[in-house]
Amino acid sequence: MNKYALFAFNGNAMCFVHVLLNALDLKARGAEAVAVVIEGEAVKLIQELETSKNPLYMKAKEQGLIDCICKACSAKMGVLEFNETTGIPVTGDMSGHPSMADYLEKGYQIITF
């Protein structure tokens, strides 16, 4: 299996940097597909990363590695309006959240942070 979905739940910026590092590394090493799914408290990090033009975040975004941001968590954390302006899909087909089952059905291995 050479497809990876990295689900980031942790709202700690240092932890999220490791998600980005791993996503970029997997892609650089030839992974067929890498999808970062931003969930939980991690949805609050997007505004700072976008505003500061964080280099790792921007690189992952430019490479299309950031697949989606959770709609329900964005709403709950008060960042839905901003997150919808980023150009990254804000989704939630599973009670407002991205579904892990959808990624599994598409052949992704799931890694959670």
Image (cartoon, rainbow, N blue to C red):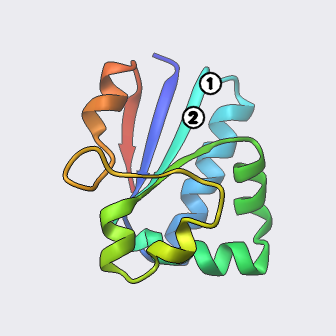
Q: Quadrant of residue 23?
A: top right
Q: Is residue 101 above or below residue 19?
A: above
- Report the quarter where the N terminus lies: top left
Residue 91 bears which disc, if any? none
Q: Secondary structure at mark 2?
A: strand
Q: Is residue 14 left or right of residue 37?
A: right
Check the picture and name the quadrant holding the C terminus: bottom left
Badge 1, how many Cα within 10 Å: few under 14, some, many 20+? some
Tell me if residue 51 comes above or below residue 68 in the rendering: below
Who is closer to the viewer here, 101 or 22? 101
How far across and how far down the image is residue 18, in percent?
57, 60
| Residue at point 78%, 53% (across, down) | 59
Residue 93 point in image, percent of width and height: 29, 44
Q: Which mark is residue 34?
A: 2
Dot 1 corresponds to which residue?
Answer: 31
Q: Quadrant of residue 57?
A: bottom right
Question: Is 32 situated left or right of 7 in this image?
Answer: right
Residue 70 locus on image (x, y percent)? 39, 58
Q: From this view, report whether residue 61 is shown above or below residue 16.
A: above
Looking at the rendered image, the disc whose residue lies closer to the viewer, 1 or 2, is 2
Taking the spot 43% from the left edge, 75% from the top edge, the residue there is: 11
**Residue at 60% over, 65% down:** 17
Amino acid on which disc 2 is placed: Val
What's the distance in space between the residues labelled 1 and 2, CA to CA?
Answer: 7 Å
Q: Residue at coordinates 70% horizontally, 28% vertically from top-left?
A: 29
* Towards the viewer: 90 or 1: 90
- How many badges with numbers are in the image? 2
Q: For the residue marked with disc 1, what is the amino acid?
A: Ala
Looking at the picture, tell me which residue is in the foreground, 84 or 53: 84
> Mark 2 packing: few (<14 Cα in 10 Å), some, or many (20+)?
many
- Measured as percent of width and height from the top left, residue 74 is found at 39, 71
Would you say the residues marked 1 and 2 are in contact, meaning their CB atoms lie under 8 Å apart? yes
